[in-house]
Amino acid sequence: MNKLRIQRATQVQSIQTQRQAYEAAAAELERSARALQSLLVRLEQKRRNETSRGAPEPYSGDFAKGQGSLDWPVRGTLVGRFGPETHPRFGTTINNNGVDIAATIGTPVRAVAKARVEYTSEDYASYGPIVILNHGDGYFTLYAHLSEILVTVGQEIPAGQIIGRVGDTGSLKGPELHFEVRKGGTALNPEDWLH
């Protein structure tokens, strides 16, 4: 009987520890999402400033025409959808500004449309390595949790070009690609853009 009580207490402690670790990781992800939001707002402001000074807009009008027909950035399994996500075991909720696609580490990640590489980082907080592409007219796509980045800032790339590879960097779900579509700083549901 005493052995059973000790076993139960150990299990309860283990679950509490797991929950605390998940909640800490989720809180870090929320902080990272706010920092990423600020970065995207700055990139949009930079784009507007350049456009107002007469700089050419890359690919004006092209991205919006592709809504609902863009290829998925990686082959894999959709494991996280846009919007609030509640953990099935712990009941904690985080807001997902994109979609999460599980795939094997090293799987090629492709640009969903032609673009200019606007930003890369080898370690962007809990997102790990990221690439942000500028598709013109204020549209950006973000690719996170990469194991490798294969493009450089300023590079013009066609739709379908491999820009990186899937990694397992900071995700709460294992190896995956976190993918977002933004209009300015506003997150849009990627599933509305992909086919």
Image: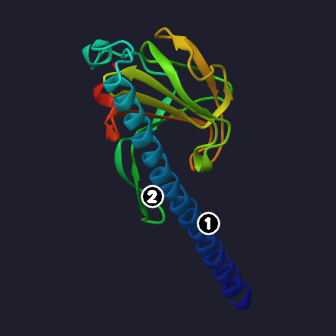
User: Seen from this angle, which residue lies furthest bottom?
Assistant: 2
Q: Residue at x 57, y 62 (%)?
A: 22
Up-down relation of residue 19 to residue 50 (above or below): below
Residue 78 occupies quadrant:
top left
Residue 186 located left or right of residue 156: left
User: Which residue is farthest right?
Assistant: 3
Q: Residue at x 33, y 28 (%)?
A: 138
Q: Position of residue 149 (x, y in %)?
A: 66, 26
Q: Nearer the viewer, mark 1 or mark 2?
A: 1
Quadrant of the frame with the N terminus: bottom right
Relative to 51, is 8 on the left or the right? right
Give residue 21's mark: 1
Asked if one can make out residue 80 in the rendered structure from this viewpoint, the answer is: no
101, 28: nearer the viewer = 28
The local secondary structure at tag 2 comes to loop
Q: 157 or 12, which is in the foreground?
A: 157
Label whose residue precedes the other's in the sequence (1 or 2):
1
* Residue that appears at 57% across and 46% down: 173
Secondary structure beneath dot 1 equals: helix
Q: Residue at x 58, y 60 (%)?
A: 25
**With 146 as the anchor, is 66 left or right in this view?**
left
Q: Which labelled disc corresponds to residue 87?
A: 2
Name the spot of residue 68 as percent of width and height, x first: 27, 19
Q: Can residue 25 be seen here?
A: yes
Contact flag, marks 1 and 2 (Cβ < 8 Å) = no
Q: Amino acid at mark 2?
A: His
Where does the C terminus fall, quadrant-wise? top left
Give the residue type that dot 1 points to: Ala
Tell me where residue 95 appears, x and y as whole percent.
38, 53
**Quick one: which residue is furthest to the top in this view?**
158
* Color encoding of the figure: rainbow
